[in-house]
Image: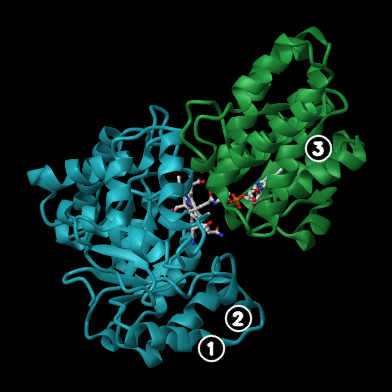
Amino acid sequence: MDNVIEGIALCVERGKISKQSPFPPDMKDQDGADEIAADAIKQGVKPDDLLDGCILGMNRIGEKFSQNKVFVPELLMAAKAMTAVMNHLQPFLESGEVKHKGKFVIGTVSGDLHDIGKNLASMTIKGHGFDVIDLGVDVPVDKFMQTIADNPGCFVGLSALLTTTMGNMEKSVKAIKEKYPDTKVLIGGAPVNQNFCDKIGADFYAADPQGATEYLKQNV
Amino acid sequence: MPIDGLKIIGESINDSVPSTHQLYNENKMYDIVALAKFQDERGAAYIDVNIGSRPASFMADLVRRIQQVTTKPLSIDTPDMEIAAAGLEAYDMTHSGGQKPILNSISLSRLEMFDLYKQQPFIPILLITEGLDKNKYSIMNSTAQETYSTAKDFVRVAFELIPEFSNDQCILDPGIMPIGGDMEGYFKRLMDSLQLIHDDPDLQGVNMSVGLSNFTVMLPSKRADGSPVKGPLESAFLTLAIPLGLNMVIGTVKRKYQLLDDDHPALQCLKDILQLNGIEVITRVMQFYS
Ligand code: B12
């Protein structure tokens, strides 16, 4: 059902949540992500196709974001439209009819309360079909360790926005790698870079959520 | 025209500004000091100095160098006690016509920073974004009432800890959030906090400041018609906040902040946002720049 995939991808990319949402103006009164997903399911479209539509839409908007063609507000709208689709997918994910691509544990490191970037990463990765466990902000190392123990095979994403909490990021990565050397750890946040990633022994530095999804795609 | 009575703490010398970060890394002290001179000439009331996590001795050296080129007082910007001590110790009031430096910033969980007052008197920026919970653990305020009550507690503490303290000897910073991601009503909460502080007779005369550039991070620089996005939105914010007692900003001397007319689209946008919630705020911001 290519037109369903494309319809959903378009709504996600453009941030068209539902028919009644006024944004974007040029899609006024058209069906949004919510209606298209609901109809598709009623008509027996494979739930997996809905997920593919989300992935396609999130990829397109993510790429534009990486190229500075759109900004955080557009990304938030896309995430909102994607959530509208995900709500229809939830029962199928719960029943196992649609499989998650993997598990992703994410949180902002201890001492740090910034979460806008972390939330964007979390939403984008969810839109790529991952089961995302978001531990929130100011997450102590122990909590990461426990969650990894409870979710074998998960990927882990850490966020830090303060130079003063980059040290806690380092501690978290080292603790995780020591006990779970096979667990892939991704890091992100404005002050973090590739050098720092190499220095602390994390597996991947993502400048933006799109970078993280590329990495995940190649490593699941 | 600069806005009458609005003091700008020039923000350029900050490790989180990428171009300055690079100057630091390349140890281009001459260029960093030139940023102080430039901001002074463009009308900054204070020059902020933030060195990130470099050694305290570096802060001392930089403060001395900057004071060679400007008589403007400095704002020593660090959460680190040792760096703050070094910066304040190096600061020479005779170079700034007897004006005290700002210490940016103290939170209720970092009260020991007041100890530095003995060594060099300063005007503290009191961060009122976070209070303390029952166990004296720092926690983010989540309502205007909480921010206001932190302000009251904090000013009371300052009176206890600083000899000859008066309200006008401190700056309250209620925190500002990027409007382009504000689905939680932070902007409305900030305006309410300013109002509560402004209306309190015990807090008359306090200074209030925010890191203004943070308001417009994450937004494009131009609207669809090519006109700027950030300057007008920041000016719109000032137009609403100055009547509520905001009288300082950590900001850039490059922007021409101004008070906007009521029908200015940026001001209309912020006024609308005060009535909106959640994702509607985001769509209203996008409507402004699309
Ligand atoms: C919003 C904000 C706040 C809000 C946070 C609210 C919230 N819910 O997040 C509030 C007001 C509470 C706040 C508080 C503080 N802040 Co603040 N804050 C900011 C601000 C303005 C924006 C940050 C942001 O959201 N950016 C937008 C997002 C989308 O970008 P991002 O986080 O980098 O995320 C992107 C990527 O990095 C990536 N990403 C991020 N994380 C992850 C994780 C993974 C796994 C992946 C894959 C990707 C990824 O994806 C995102 C999209 O591309 C910045 C200024 C700035 N110019 O950035 C300051 C800033 C980060 N804050 C700063 C400071 C100092 C503070 C305070 C200490 C006090 C103060 N003076 O304000 C407190 C600290 C509180 C604490 N303990 O954490 C400094 C940090 C300086 C430094 N380098 O250490 C900054 C840079 C401001 C400045 N110029 O001084 N802040």
Element carrying mark 2: helix
Residue B206 higher or lower than A30, as above or below? below
Q: Nearer the viewer, residue A125 or B160?
A: A125
For badge 1, the amino acid type reads Asp
Label 3 and label 1 in one chain: no
Residue type, numbered disc 2: Leu
Q: Position of residue A121 (x, y in %)?
A: 67, 41
**Furthest residue in direction top, as rendered:** A95
* Viewer-nearest residue: B194 or B28: B194
* Disc 2 crowd, CA 10 A, few/some/many (<14, 14-19, 20+): some
Q: Secondary structure at mark 3?
A: helix
The green one among the chains is A
Q: CA distance from mark 3 to mark 2?
A: 35 Å
Q: Chain of mark 2?
A: B
Indicate left or right for B99 with B282 as reference. Answer: left
Q: Colour of chain B?
A: cyan
Tag 3 residue:
A176
* Residue at position x 77%, y 38% in the image: A56
Which labelled disc corresponds to residue B23? 2
Give the colour scheme shown.
by chain
**Residue depicted at x 50% and y 35%:** A28
